[in-house]
Image (spheres, rainbow, N blue to C red):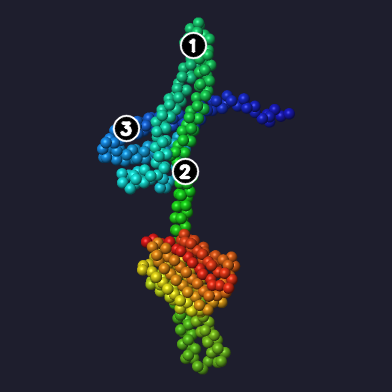
Amino acid sequence: MDISAAPAIPWRRAPRAVVRAYWAGSTWRSLMHLVTGGVLGTLGGVAIFALVATGIGGLITIVIPIITGGTLLVVNGLLTAMQRSRHTAFLGAEWPEGPFTQPVTFAPRALLALVKNPRTWRQFSYHVIAGIYGFFAAAFAVTAWTTGPAMILAPLIGRDSELRANWILFSTGVAVTIAAPWITRGLAALDGLLARILLGTSRTEALEMRVTDLAASRNSTVDAADAERRRIERDLHDGAQQRLTSLAMNLGIARATLNDLPEDGARAIAEAHEEAKQVLTDLRDLVRGLHPAVLEDRGLDAALSAVAARSPIPVRLKVDMDRRVARDVEAVAYFVVSEALTNVARHSGAEHAAVEVALAERQLRLRIADDGRGGADPQGGTGLQGLADRVRSVDGAFRITSPLGGPTTIEAELPCAS
């Protein structure tokens, strides 16, 4: 049997663990954490007690409680910042950046918001607890580190008649000295736990921050995509579309003036001319689908009027807007109406369609209805799911009603600033 391969007995590791505990950085960081916490907690507790006493003593007036209350909120914010910094420096705690870690100001609205926020009272309760716990935890840790070695030296300075008592002190001192690193770490860990609960963010606040970050990320993505679409539209309009227009014109001139060409040559020019015109039409439709220039220049009413005029079925359009809305909302509204009317023409068998757009307060409401056969299914590959995704990209609401036999109604509500 290979003795070297045998697992180490746990009690054999004990001396090594005890020695390592004394030299571990976490032990001394924990001790510094407790010492600084004792000083900061005591000073903070005294300041809070003084402000509260002053405010209570001045209840017969109005000014003193208001001043002391505002000062108390500011002191609470400063103590929170210093305590968080201490926990980060010595225990490696991490605090999420965001609206929950902004500095406190004397602005009335900011102070009122702090009073209403339960996070403020959690922080305040930590500082009250730290004023007591911080002092006693630091005192207990320092006592463990100092009295343990002193008790070990008791047999060397005691009298022979007190030998038994001295050896009891010696044994107790050894135990306290061995336990000092673990006592220090335990007290620091308990303080860290209290800080995470009371100085940190709750699960609800963390989710709010996450939602805010995701919304900002989504908005930046939507803005970037919209800007890219506008760039591609400009490049196609000013580049390829202009060249195709020139090509179609030259082919038209050649077709009209070159009368002495062989029949095959004349036919080839005519076909090339018609093909160039068709490609130009397709390119114009593509450019219009990316980001129509009329939407950028004249707004949603003019852009939807152009869509209704191009529709192969009659469309009754009503737009009630007294102002323009954000570009991303306008773009979503335009594409929802445009793609919905395309679906009506291709799949519904309708003879008429109606589009209503109304701006009321902070909502842009869209309603597209047709008298077709109905039975539209967002999962059926007709682009309805894409419409819903476009609406959701700006936090809008999308509804479709399409019973068999019709009619089909699509409604969308797009939030926009007032």
Question: If you read the primary sequence from the N terminus, does the residue marked by circle 1 or circle 2 appear first?
Answer: 1
Determine whether the residue tagged by mark 2 lies in a helix, strand or loop. loop
Above or below, 254 against 41 in this view is: below
Q: Looking at the image, which residue is at 48% across and 48% down? A: 207
Residue 178, percent across and down? Answer: 53, 23
Q: Amino acid at mark 3?
A: Ala
Residue situated in front as seen by the camera: 376 or 6: 376
> Which residue position holds label 1?
156
Q: Looking at the image, which residue is at 53% across and 12% down? A: 167
Q: Nearer the viewer, mark 1 or mark 2?
A: 2
Q: Nearer the viewer, mark 3 or mark 1?
A: 3
Residue situated in front as seen by the camera: 388 or 89: 388
Q: Tell me if residue 366 can be seen.
A: yes
Determine whether the residue tagged by mark 3 lies in a helix, strand or loop. helix
Above or below, 216 against 373 in this view is: above
Q: Amino acid at mark 1?
A: Leu
Above or below, 318 against 273 in this view is: above
Residue that lies at the very extreme toward the right in this rendered image: 1
Q: Which mark is residue 53?
A: 3
Residue that lies at the very extreme toward the top in this rendered image: 161
Q: Which mark is residue 202?
A: 2
Q: Looking at the image, which residue is at 36% across and 67% down? A: 323
